Image (cartoon, rainbow, N blue to C red):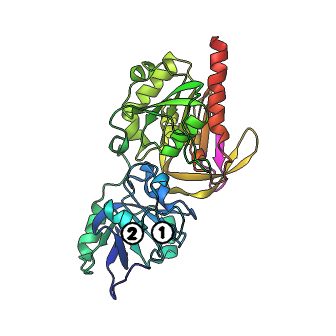
Amino acid sequence: MPISQAPFPTACLALADGTVFYGQGFGATGQREAELCFNTAMSGYQEIMTDPSYAGQIVTFTFPHIGNVGVTPEDDETADPVAEGMVVKWMPTQASNWRTAQELSDWLAARGRVAIGGIDTRRLTRAIRQQGAPHVALAHDPEGKFNVEALVAAARGFPGLTGRDLAKGVTCAQSYRWDEMRWAWPDGYPRQTEARHRVVAIDYGAKRNILRCLASAGCEVTVLPATATAEDIMAHSPDGVFLSNGPGDPAATGEYAVPMIRGLLDKTELPIFGICLGHQLLGLALGARTIKMNHGHHGANHPVKEIDTGKVEITSMNHGFAVDTQTLPSGVLESHVSLFDGSNCGIRMQDRPVFSVQHHPEASPGPQDSFYLFERFAQNMDRKAATAG
């Protein structure tokens, strides 16, 4: 059954420039302030809401059918939603899928996430593209009572993402082992029992499916918190190091992450692989700079070209900052580039097994166009082991 709708607006989205959208609220009641972005993916709303990289953001979904397959615990990228809220065109209908465990609205309500439906998401998306990702306040009140001036003031008071380290808020509290591999019919997630390589993954907000892909590539994965030092990592005697995705400004997280990465680069020849925030942090550690994008890249339909091969991959993206290609130092090459706007999507060291990408190879939009990157990381560790032997 569709969510019952009041004859008056029960949710309000206020932008810092004073623009106000009214709609129907669902999920939790209350108010949230955040940066507003839009995501163009046609599926995966649960994975998007639970992606730690969305900390500090509210997501506008450009695809109108959100909630129609419900939610299931197997699809969570982390234990709870991390995005502050969601904006959709049509109110969710009753879920219809054999895997459904809970209705989207009930799931959001139980986890304190606010949502608004009935919004002209085309108009809102155009506004985001034109003015950049705005600061907003989203309120849900079943009585429909809103202080619009206060909401606009709250939106203007949001500190934004620039200069903010959000990784510490989403990282793990302590280290743990991960052996779950990618989902396979009919048994679900198998366990890694024949690992070839020991990998330390630094959790800046790691998605579970990234860890699964590492395990499926033959890795025994130990996950360490974002603040781990080079000494903490080397205490595990790894064959390789992985730098995860995550939220916030890479320059702020880099205050403690960059010294760690440089420590590894200076003292070891270990293969290193980074994704998303991990890519940006590697770029900073190698001497490049990062920049805030106008509205970022968020979606599952982004074409990326691998420069060496000319191959075009259809990728999943979720980032508001990017590595500035013009600042890459000598010996660091651009490996991938966005065919949407020419922004950097990958780097590699010319003489070391160290590389990273901005896109998400684990998200499978292609559906497996970019999985070779995990295999490349494993091959780098194979070569390192052969050389050592």
Residue located farthest toward the front when viewing the structure as drawn: 187
**Marks 2,1: beta carbons within 8 A:** yes
**Neighbour class for label 2 at 10 Å: few (<14), some, many (≥20)?**
many
What percent of the width, then of the height, locates residue 17? 36, 70
> Percent x, y for residue 267?
49, 16
Quarter of the picture containing the N terminus is bottom left
Amino acid under label 2? Answer: Ser
**Which quadrant would the C terminus be assigned to in this image?**
top right
Name, please, the residue furthest toward the top. Answer: 389
Locate residue 196, reporting x and y percent. 60, 25
Q: Which residue is mark 1?
A: 67
Q: Which residue is depicted at the point 32% across and 62% down?
A: 110
In this picture, is 17 found above or below 246? below
- For the point 53% across and 73% down, the residue is 64
The tag on residue 105 is 2
Identify the secondary structure beneath mark 2.
Answer: helix
